[in-house]
Image (tube, coloured by chain):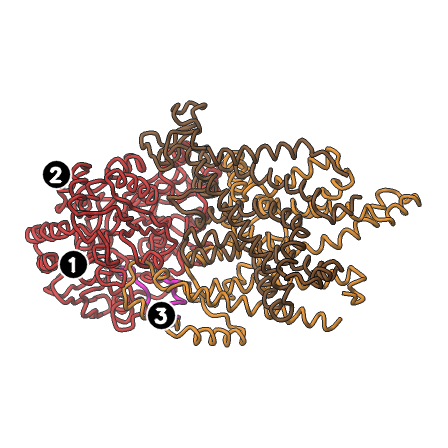
């Protein structure tokens, strides 16, 4: 059991190290960031000075070692553009993304899971078909297109929702719906198949035979068991949400990590991109670790170390 | 127990068929070249809404025929998605087989790559590489091919591991068959249905990924065009010349929708897990 | 009953009243907050390190210029007006500037000649390791900047330079406080700048928002708005929807084709200014790559003659801008401008074909490196031009790239470029000599596209030394001719800046893109 977790932990660390190294090598070998940063009219000596100042004139291996060394002390370098510590810049954007992500996820759960349960219970009927069609609908529409259509409808024509940015609860509605639609679809489909599997189990038939009311059967017997596989896709959902945030935050001028990434990439801010990739990878890897842990707690077979 | 496919599934299949046919022979629908411009007829609405007759679906901002643009975009989007899906499936499956065959450190290293890719949303990797290295068709196709390979690798590895523990596999090897023969002749057919289902999932995702990258300006670049690019370029015109973005939007929607419905139906039929479950 | 709309009118009335009377701080309490949706900000607000179209918009609200271009009195802005410098005069190579008394910086300190000398001095702009190295370009020729007393500054240049006051209307003319700048350092200063303009920066998050507050000790008196919020809204749909629904008071940057729709809203006004800037492309005239067919001037001239730029501009911009038929013959150069100058290389497909045939061009594809979304409509124009070149048998491929580093990576045959014209108001020095001359990046950098010819260099030297108008004009024509003999580039059209704002705001746009939410330029 302990060995199982130790190996997991080791692999997590290895993965993160790999992410850091890979990003570092790719970013530094892709060309000189200085011209992109200083703009088209930068003079040669200006470029030279900038490069010296940021240690970009050093051999790659020296830059790499000093970066790893810095990281060991909790330093992630300064942004090449606005010269502030990378972590400060990222952390001030995290709350916006996390709050939007939570609202979107809550929305997706509230819609997706009940929809999946209902579809499973009405398997093969019209309701099932309709719900599943809607679930596919959720991820067949490119999210930026959905977002812009919503802006035009609700902000420009009806003028009932703010068009962009943060501030009030109303500001959450359009970005969260845009971001959550995709996840809601995935959740609905997944819940449906997990529920179907559980509903077939003997103990469900036994409960029905014993005369346990249907609502109680579903809520207290079926769903908790179906929840186990549903939990496992939280990691997947997280990836979807981050990927979605990159686009949705740009559409709605949402000051979060996704938009930061888009600007950092287009401005070739090596240090910032590097920090962002690391933070996102760490979040996802840790989330998956947490999912494994929860899974172990939920599923007695794994708890007993039978894996 | 075989069920007859539902109307929706048949409809999806027909729609996909139609889309493929349009992509293959679409140029017969228009006499205009993809790059042909008519500067006096910019942003003209579709013919049925009072636009010039020679442009049935309207023109874009430099007076190019939307039909010609859409056909070219469709061809590009489908080819990219097809190439990406196939590369990913082949590459991932081979990696999975290799990992399962050699075990030990080879497996560990390969699985680390799998973990690595799973630890980052793919769009982030694609976005960064395209922006830093500069967009080219080759890089773009390679990236699309890298999309989702880790799922195939995991899938293939899992199937091989469980299959090699089966008596028949041991028997085949004991009879002196080359391992390659074992994989190609005996294991691949077993994993095929799962792979096909996965392919139907990856294909629409690649189309959507290409669309999202186009929105960020990093999709297919002119003079080539794709549905995502037409949609992304047309978005500023939604309130004045909606036809530029709505046509490709509808096409993308229809393709991903049909593909997903078809994939679901296929899974219900092919997936052995589901089969045992429902029987 | 006070609805949202009528409330707007009431507060507007109050604002107008406030402007017509001597303004007191009592009125300041009722001043409105103005929200401006912009496409982008910049990483820092340093006057030189932060040079960008997106920063020039708000700079004058934070910093005051030494000398001002007066676009109210003259459309081309060729009249100079005192800023924080009140008078100036020249004695040979030395210019003396008298400064305004009692100008306050946002931190409460009073501006002195020390601050101005530092602003223009070697430590910040043109020394060995200056804080803002790009200043060197703008301060070329400076040899001494010195505070003579509290309110007098002297600038000495290498050779007689009649254009110093004009140069101070640009980026280098924004005054920064020496002590504070040195205390916090250039980087921190760029994040929380201190100037002597009408608004004081309170919040700056470079990828998101810039907020500023009225600075009532401003030397021209309190500004009309209590607060300015410059907010990044990257999508046009978002900016438009927000303006229409009155979340925003202003928006910047409208795709040309959408201007008409914006203007169709009865309570929205579209404002437009022709910028002192021309999108262009450069021909790579050098044998790098070795088989570059563009080394032959006939091919370059043939390609120029194949472009029907007037039609392109008409199609993409309507009547809002124009194509300069002869390079450097730009209307913003007042007396230098000749509207009837004949065009030696007019659109003519036959002539183009003949020239191209003469060059022996063999149909080899030419790579045109283009920075993505760098200028409005550039990519669209490129696609049209490629079609026009195809018609005369020249095969050009547009390669759209994400940033300058990639654009500057060889091999390429054509390259997109930016060409500003406003460094010296009313004089073609910048586009003709500074941008192409022997010190320019396009003739010195690793990605250089041409080597100035002896003819051009000789003409340039004469031009640099000419100080009176007649000889200046004669040498300008000679230099322009020398450039055209090589034709190392092509000027496409004059850039257009555009904005939309609430119709009840009076706003005067400026060709430098500045959005001055004060003075004669904005009445709330």
The percent position of residue C513, horizontal first and vertical second, equals: 31, 48
Say if mark 2 contacts mark 1, CB within 8 Å.
no
Chain under disc 3: A
Q: Which mark is residue A51?
A: 3
Q: Colour of chain B?
A: brown
Q: Report helix, strand or loop for mark 1.
A: loop
- Let me know if residue C187 is in the magenta part: yes
The percent position of residue C463, horizontal first and vertical second, equals: 10, 57
Q: Residues within 10 Å of mark 1 (few under 14, many from 20)?
A: some
Q: Main secondary structure of the magenta part?
A: helix
Measure how far apart labels 1 and 3 are at the Cα level.
Answer: 28 Å
User: Vertical placement of C124 versus B70: above or below?
Assistant: below
Q: Which mark is residue C340?
A: 2
Q: Which residue is mark 1?
A: C452
Left or right, residue B261 beside residue B77: right
Q: Residues within 10 Å of mark 2 (few under 14, many from 20)?
A: few
Same-chain status of marks 3 and 2 = no
The percent position of residue B115, horizontal first and vertical second, equals: 60, 63
Task: Tell me, by letter, which chain the rendering colours orange.
Answer: A
Chain under disc 1: C
Residue C4 appears in view = no
User: Vertical placement of C177 versus C344: above or below?
Assistant: below
Q: Nearer the viewer, mark 2 or mark 1?
A: 1
Which stretch appears magenta? Answer: C172-195
């Amino acid at each position: 059991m302990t060995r199982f977790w130790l190996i997991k932990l080791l692999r997590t660390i290895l993965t993160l190290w790999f992410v850091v190294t890979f990003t570092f090598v790719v970013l530094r070998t892709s060309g000189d960031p200085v011209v992109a940063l200083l703009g088209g009219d930068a003079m040669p000596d200006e470029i030279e000075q900038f490069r010296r100042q940021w240690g970009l004139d050093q051999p790659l291996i020296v830059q790499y070692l000093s970066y790893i060394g810095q990281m060991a002390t909790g330093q992630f370098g300064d942004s090449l553009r606005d010269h502030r510590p990378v972590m400060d810049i990222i952390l001030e954007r995290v709350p916006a993304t996390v709050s939007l992500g939570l609202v979107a996820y809550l929305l997706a759960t509230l819609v997706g899971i009940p929809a999946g349960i209902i579809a499973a219970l009405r398997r093969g009927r019209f309701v099932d078909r309709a719900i599943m069609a809607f679930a596919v609908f959720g991820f067949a529409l490119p999210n930026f297109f959905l977002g812009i259509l919503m802006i035009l409808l609700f902000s420009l024509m009806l003028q009932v929702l703010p068009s962009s940015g943060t501030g009030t609860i109303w500001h959450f509605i359009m970005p969260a719906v845009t971001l959550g639609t995709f996840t809601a679809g995935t959740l609905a489909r997944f819940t449906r198949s997990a529920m179907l599997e559980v509903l077939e189990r003997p103990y469900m038939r036994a409960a029905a035979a014993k005369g346990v009311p249907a609502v109680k059967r579903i809520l207290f017997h079926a769903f908790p068991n179906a929840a186990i596989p549903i939990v496992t896709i939280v990691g997947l959902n997280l990836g979807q949400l981050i990927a979605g945030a990159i686009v949705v935050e740009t559409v709605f001028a949402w000051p979060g990590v996704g938009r930061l990434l888009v600007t950092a990439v287009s401005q070739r801010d090596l240090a910032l991109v590097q920090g962002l990739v690391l933070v996102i990878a760490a979040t996802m890897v840790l989330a998956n670790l947490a999912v494994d842990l929860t899974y172990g707690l939920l599923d007695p077979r794994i708890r007993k170390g039978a894996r | 127990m075989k069920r007859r496919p539902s109307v929706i599934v048949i409809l999806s299949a027909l729609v996909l068929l139609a889309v493929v046919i349009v992509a293959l022979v679409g140029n017969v629908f228009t006499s205009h070249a993809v790059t042909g411009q008519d500067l006096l007829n910019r942003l003209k609405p579709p013919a049925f809404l009072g636009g010039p007759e020679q442009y049935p679906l309207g023109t874009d901002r430099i007076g190019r025929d939307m039909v010609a643009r859409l056909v070219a975009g469709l061809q590009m989007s489908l080819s990219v998605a097809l190439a990406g899906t196939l590369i990913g499936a082949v590459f991932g499956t081979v990696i999975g087989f290799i990992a399962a065959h050699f075990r030990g450190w080879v497996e560990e290293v390969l699985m680390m790559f799998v973990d690595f890719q799973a630890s980052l949303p793919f769009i982030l990797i694609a976005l960064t590489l395209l922006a830093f290295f500069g967009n080219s068709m080759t890089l773009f196709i390679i990236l699309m091919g890298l999309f989702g390979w880790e799922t195939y690798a995991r899938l293939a590895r899992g199937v091989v591991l469980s299959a090699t523990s089966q008596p028949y596999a041991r028997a085949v090897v004991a009879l002196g068959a080359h391992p390659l023969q074992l994989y190609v002749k005996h294991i691949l057919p077993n994993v095929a249905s799962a792979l096909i289902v996965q392919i139907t999932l990856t294909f629409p995702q690649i189309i959507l990924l290409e669309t999202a990258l186009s929105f960020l300006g990093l999709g297919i670049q002119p003079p080539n065009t794709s549905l995502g690019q037409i949609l992304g370029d047309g978005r500023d015109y939604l309130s004045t010349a909606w036809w530029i973005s709505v046509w490709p939007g509808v096409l993308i929607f229809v393709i991903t929708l049909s593909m997903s419905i078809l994939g679901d139906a296929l899974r219900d039929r092919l997936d052995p897990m589901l089969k045992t479950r429902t029987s | 009953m006070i609805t949202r709309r009528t409330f707007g009118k009431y507060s507007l009335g109050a604002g107008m009243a406030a402007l017509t009377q001597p303004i007191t701080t009592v009125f300041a309490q009722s001043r409105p907050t103005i929200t401006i949706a912009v496409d982008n900000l910049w990483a820092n607000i340093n006057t030189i390190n932060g040079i960008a179209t997106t920063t020039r918009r708000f700079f004058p609200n934070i910093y005051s210029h030494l000398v001002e271009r007066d676009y109210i009195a003259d459309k081309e802005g060729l009249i100079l007006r005192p800023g924080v410098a009140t008078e100036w005069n020249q004695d040979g190579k030395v210019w003396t500037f008298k400064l305004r008394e009692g100008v306050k910086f946002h931190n409460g300190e009073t501006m002195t000649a020390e601050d101005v000398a530092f602003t223009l001095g070697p430590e910040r702009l043109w020394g060995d390791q200056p804080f803002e190295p790009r200043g060197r370009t703008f301060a070329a020729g400076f040899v001494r900047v010195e505070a003579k007393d509290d309110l007098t500054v002297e600038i000495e240049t290498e050779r007689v330079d009649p254009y110093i006051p004009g140069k101070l209307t640009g980026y280098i003319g924004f005054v920064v406080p020496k002590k504070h700048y040195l205390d916090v350092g250039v980087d921190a200063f760029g994040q929380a700048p201190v100037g002597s303009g009408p608004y004081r920066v309170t919040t700056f998050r470079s990828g998101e928002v810039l907020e500023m507050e009225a600075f009532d000790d401003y030397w021209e008196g309190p500004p009309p708005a209590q607060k300015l919020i410059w907010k990044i809204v990257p999508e046009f749909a978002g900016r438009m929807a927000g303006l229409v629904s009155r979340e925003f008071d202003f928006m910047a940057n409208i795709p040309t084709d959408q201007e008409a729709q914006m203007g169709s809203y009865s309570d929205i006004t579209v404002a437009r200014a022709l910028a002192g800037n021309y999108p262009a492309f450069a021909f790579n005239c050098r044998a790098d790559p070795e088989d570059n067919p563009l080394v032959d001037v006939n091919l370059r001239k043939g390609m120029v003659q194949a472009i029907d730029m007037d039609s392109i501009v008409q199609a993409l911009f309507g009547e809002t801008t124009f194509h300069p038929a002869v390079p450097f013959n730009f209307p913003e150069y007042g007396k230098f401008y000749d509207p009837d100058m004949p065009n030696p290389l007019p659109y003519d497909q036959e002539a183009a074909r003949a020239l191209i045939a003469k060059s022996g061009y063999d149909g080899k594809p030419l790579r045109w490196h283009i920075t993505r979304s760098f200028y409005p409509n550039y990519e669209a124009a490129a696609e049209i031009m490629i079609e026009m070149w195809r018609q005369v048998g020249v095969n050009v491929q547009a390669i759209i790239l994400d940033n300058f580093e990639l654009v500057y990576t060889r091999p390429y045959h054509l390259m997109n470029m930016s060409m500003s014209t406003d460094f010296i108001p009313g004089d073609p020095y910048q586009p003709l000599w500074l941008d192409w001359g022997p010190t320019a990046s396009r003739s010195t950098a690793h990605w250089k596209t041409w080597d100035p010819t002896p003819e051009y260099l000789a003409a340039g030297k004469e031009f640099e030394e000419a100080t009176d108008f007649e000889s200046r004009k004669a040498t300008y024509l000679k230099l322009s001719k020398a450039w055209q003999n090589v034709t190392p580039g092509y000027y496409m059209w004059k850039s257009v800046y555009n904005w939309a704002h609430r119709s009840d705001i009076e706003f005067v746009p400026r060709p430098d893109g500045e959005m001055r939410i004060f003075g004669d330029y904005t009445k709330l």
